[in-house]
Image: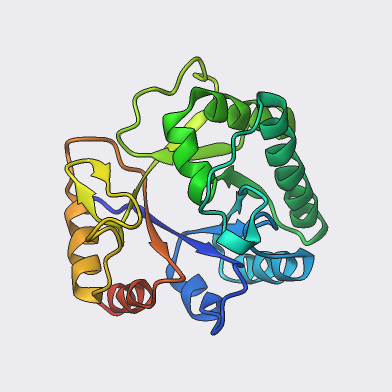
């Protein structure tokens, strides 16, 4: 089984905050940048924590919707999408530079992530932002997505989720039975299955820090 990079959503100002225990056991940190969670203080703190642990830094933009934790879609125009994403990514990139860090990739959060998989307009806006901010930034997309449009100049990282339920290669929508795995054993088992998956390309596997079972699964994998 080949190793896959582990990524995790961090800097989300959770209580209790799991960032300190998670950061040393992951490869990539998707850091909330104010849309669904976070502020300058939390961003800087999480950036520094990632640097201390030699973890690759990604920005985690979202719809401006803290009340719903970024899990509700908004019908925005192409220009509105671009402005929303560009403002969050550019500001986060500046905070990285000010704190001796390098931004390496973009991973949308929640509804914005799912909309990117289902709506060409959202994907195109995301790629347009990358080309404007730093063409070397990679974009995390859902593994199995085939409709990546005319964005061949963007580097894509194909992702699956250790702690989300699947029907074949399709992730179950939140709210459906079995959509979120709540057993550390089940999450570890699914992670191990993805390590040997041959049906589609996988570059990175996500664990959610707001799922206590995922945090426990990460600890078990680290000690295995």
The percent coordinates of residue 79 (x first, y second) are 72, 26
In this view, the residue in front, 147 or 176, is 176
Q: Report the residue at 73% width, 52% height from top.
A: 92
Which of these two is toward me, 173 or 169? 173
Circle count: 0
Q: Name which quarter of the figure residue 96 lies in.
A: bottom right
Rendered location of residue 190, percent (x, y): 20, 60
Residue lying farthest bottom? 16
Report the residue at 60% width, 66% height from top: 50
Q: Quadrant of residue 75?
A: top right
State whether residue 119 is above or below residue 107.
Answer: above
Which is nearer the eye, 78 or 52? 78
Please tell me which residue is depicted at 25% across the width and 66% down the height of the picture: 187
Spot the residue most to the top.
150
On the question of residue 18 being in view, the answer is yes
| Left or right of residue 174: residue 224 | left
Colouring rule applied to residues: rainbow
The correct choice, above or below, for 38 with respect to 72 in the image is: below
Q: Position of residue 118 (x, y in %)?
A: 42, 31
Q: Whole-percent x and y of residue 136?
A: 62, 33
Q: Nearer the viewer, residue 43 or 164?
A: 164
Question: Quarter of the image containing the C terminus?
Answer: bottom left
Any part of residue 1 in sight: no
Q: Is residue 30 above or below residue 156?
A: below
Image-quadrant location for residue 36: bottom right
Residue beneath the point at 72% across and 47% down: 88
């Amino acid at each position: 089984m080949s190793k896959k990079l582990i990524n995790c959503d961090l800097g989300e100002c959770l209580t209790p905050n799991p960032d300190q225990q998670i950061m040393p056991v992951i490869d990539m940190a998707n850091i909330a940048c104010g849309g669904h969670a976070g502020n300058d203080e939390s961003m800087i703190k999480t950036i520094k924590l990632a640097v201390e642990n030699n973890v690759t830094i990604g920005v985690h933009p979202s719809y401006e919707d803290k009340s719903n934790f970024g899990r509700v879609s908004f019908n925005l125009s192409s220009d509105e999408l671009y402005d929303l994403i560009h403002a969050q990514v550019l500001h986060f990139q500046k905070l990285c530079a000010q704190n001796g860090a390098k931004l390496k990739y973009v991973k949308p959060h929640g509804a914005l992530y799912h909309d990117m998989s289902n709506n060409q307009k959202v994907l195109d806006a995301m790629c347009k932002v990358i080309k404007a901010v730093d063409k070397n930034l990679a974009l995390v997309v859902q593994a199995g997505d085939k409709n990546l449009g005319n964005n061949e100049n963007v580097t894509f990282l194909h992702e699956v989720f250790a702690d989300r339920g699947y029907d074949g290669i399709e992730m179950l929508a939140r709210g459906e039975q079995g959509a979120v795995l709540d057993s550390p054993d089940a999450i570890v088992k699914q992670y191990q299955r993805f390590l040997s998956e041959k049906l589609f390309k996988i570059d990175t596997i996500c664990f959610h820090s707001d799922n206590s079972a995922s945090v426990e699964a990460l600890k078990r994998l680290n000690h295995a």
